[in-house]
Image: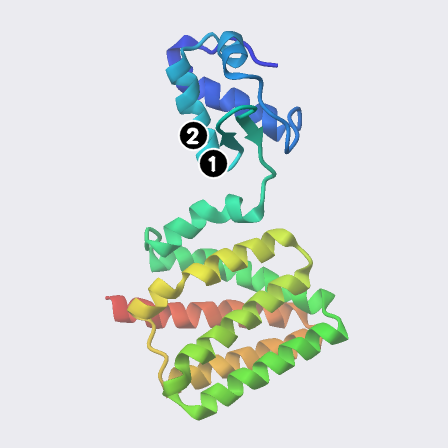
Amino acid sequence: MFKAAKQNRIFQDVVQQIEATILSGKLAPGEMLPPERELKDMLQVSRGTLREALRVLEHKGLIEIKLGVGGGAVVQDISYDQVSESLALLIRYQKVSLRHLSEFRVGVEGRVSALAAERATTVDVLRLKLLLEEARQFAEKGTDFQKEFVDVDKRIHLTLAEMTGNPVYVSLHHTVHDNIDQYYESFLSMQEREMNENLADLDQIVAAVEARDTEKARQLAEAHVLRFNHYMENRAA
C-alpha cells in the first residue's frame, strides 16, 4: 500500500502518499489506516515524522485520529464543507481583494443564473417569486430592515444555485454568501437607493429565469455583481 518515503522531502511525501491512497478510493471512509508501527515501517520514517503527517491529514479532514484502545487513524468521508473551508477562510478574513472576489463572482453568478433559467421548474420559479416578494416588503419598510433585505438577497442567490442541480455551484454559493458579510459591513452602503436598485436587479433576473432566457439571465446577474462591487470599491478607495 505504501513505500519508503523519499528522503529529500520526507514529510511532504508521507502526506502525499497517504492522501493519494485515500482519494483514489483504496481506503474507503470508515476504514482505518494500518497501525502506526506498521505504517512507520512501510514508509521507513520516524514516529515523529509520521505523527506530524497524520496531524496534517486530520486538519485537512481526510482522517480522524481516535485515541485509546482500538484507536488509530480512521478515513473520513469528504464533504463539501471541508473542501470549501480554505475559500471560506480567505473570504472571512478579507485575504481576497474586492476586485478578485468580483471577478470570481461575475463568472459564477452569471453561469448559475443561466443554468437556473435553463433548468427552472414551475415550483422553482414560485420559490423565487416568494423570496422576491419578501425582499420587496423589507425594501418598502426602509433602511431599518437592510439586514433582513440582504439576508433574503442571499437566499435568492442560493436558490438560483440549487436550481442548477450542480452541487459544486451550491457549495461555492454557500461558501461565498456565508462569509461575505465582512466585506458588506466594511464597504457596502445599503441605503434606500441601493436597496431599490438591488431589488430591481433581482426582479429582472427572476423574470429572465421565468422566461427561460438564459443569456439575459446571465447578463443581468453579471451586471448586478459588477455594479455593487463598483459601489464597494468606491467606498474602499
Pointer 2 with pointer 1, Cβ within 8 A: yes
117 sits to left or right of 99: right
In-front residue for pair 58/13? 58
Vertical order, 40 against 174 (above or below):
above
Report if residue 42 is visible in the image: yes
**Residue at (50% x, 37% y) in the render:** 61
- Give, as a three-letter code, the residue at label 2: Val
**Residue at (64% x, 68% y) in the render:** 215
In-front residue for pair 128/99? 128
Q: Which mark is residue 56?
A: 2
Quadrant assignment for the C terminus? bottom left
Give the x, y percent position of residue 78: 59, 40
Q: Quadrant of residue 127?
A: bottom right
Q: Quadrant of residue 120?
A: bottom right
Looking at the image, the residue that sits furthest to the front is 69
Label 2 sits on a secondary structure element that is helix
